[in-house]
Amino acid sequence: MNVVLNDSKAEVPLSGTGLGYRTKWYKDLVRDKPALGFLELLAENHFARGGPARWQARQLAEHYPVTLHCVGMSLGSLDRLDATYLYRLRQLANEVGAVEVSDHIAFTRLNGVEYHDLLPLPGTEEALAHLCTRVGEAQDRLGRRLLLENASRYLPDVEEAIPEQEFMQALCERTGCGLLLDINNLYVNQHNVQGNARRVIQQLSPKHVGYVHIAGHEKRGKLLLDSHAAEVPGSVWDLLFLWLERSPDTPVLIERDGELPPLSEQLQQVAVSESLRSQAQTHAA
């Protein structure tokens, strides 16, 4: 696959622990400028040029390294990639100097119908080849490498032939993309569809991982829902430390989408992450 250019303004790689940005925290972030490694912005929320959300994105980028996280590329879909969407994303990434741009190993559209959910792909060679083609096209249009996130699952993959970590590594090797490793999703899948979170963490090559996501989840009947509406539970912290033991300098992003606490409380989660990172770095020294 062709090497893609990166025409963002960003020059400094990510480090430390960051937060998924939510509007509720804007004033506190700009006023107090708490110590954070970076902020992750939901890209589609900031597409409108001249709007208040775009202005906020520019203001935040003056104080913190910024990444853009997308839910609308639908890279696994059979529908054509949306050229207008990718153009708007490239404009935003360049304007805020995005260090990384990410989406998911999933699809959200089929036959022009938008499902407003991240639907996972089967672990087959056919799906992998199709995704590689789409990722290559998206990277060429954006002029940069993408990070792709592993999706949560709620039904077993009856067609799976390629283990998840092998699927992700092959995707990176064939396209030059990187991974946004969602550790909470690994835990959710372990519970819901008998995935093996520890095996993925132990076998996945750290060189492919741009940064990791951690978040909370909730119980819905027999399933765990990837809701991002709670604090990070101990089970996910344990898996994070397992990863950091292998790759102690990996940046960490804490997600929270619902039941948002005050920023001061969310910063306590950042402190826990930084403590684990420090422990892992000490063990590696």
Image (cartoon, rainbow, N blue to C red):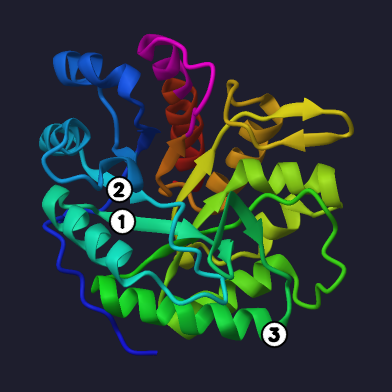
**Identity of the amino acid at label 1?**
Glu
**Residue at image location 87% in from the left, 68% down from the top:** 158
Quick one: label 1, few (<14), some, or many (20+) residues within 10 Å?
A: many
Q: Tell me how far mark 2 sits from mark 3, CA to CA.
A: 30 Å
Count of picture labels: 3
**Identity of the amino acid at label 3?**
Glu
Write down the residue under mark 3.
125
Q: Tell me how far mark 2 sits from mark 1, CA to CA.
A: 5 Å
Query: In front: 154, or 253?
Result: 154
**Residue at image location 18% in from the left, 39% down from the top:** 54
Horizontal and vertical percent for residue 284? Answer: 49, 47
**Residue at image location 51% in from the left, 43% down from the top:** 213
Q: Are marks 2 and 1 in contact (CB under 8 Å)?
A: yes
Horizontal and vertical percent for residue 145? Answer: 33, 70
Q: Is residue 252 above or below residue 68?
A: above
**Identity of the amino acid at label 2?**
Thr
- Label 3 residue SS: helix
Write down the residue under mark 1.
100
On residue 67, the disc is: 2
Lateral position of residue 154 relative to residue 271, left or right: right
- Label 1 residue SS: strand
- Label 2 residue SS: strand
Segment colored magenta: 255-269
Tell me, yes or no, whether the highlighted magenta stretch contains residue 204.
Answer: no
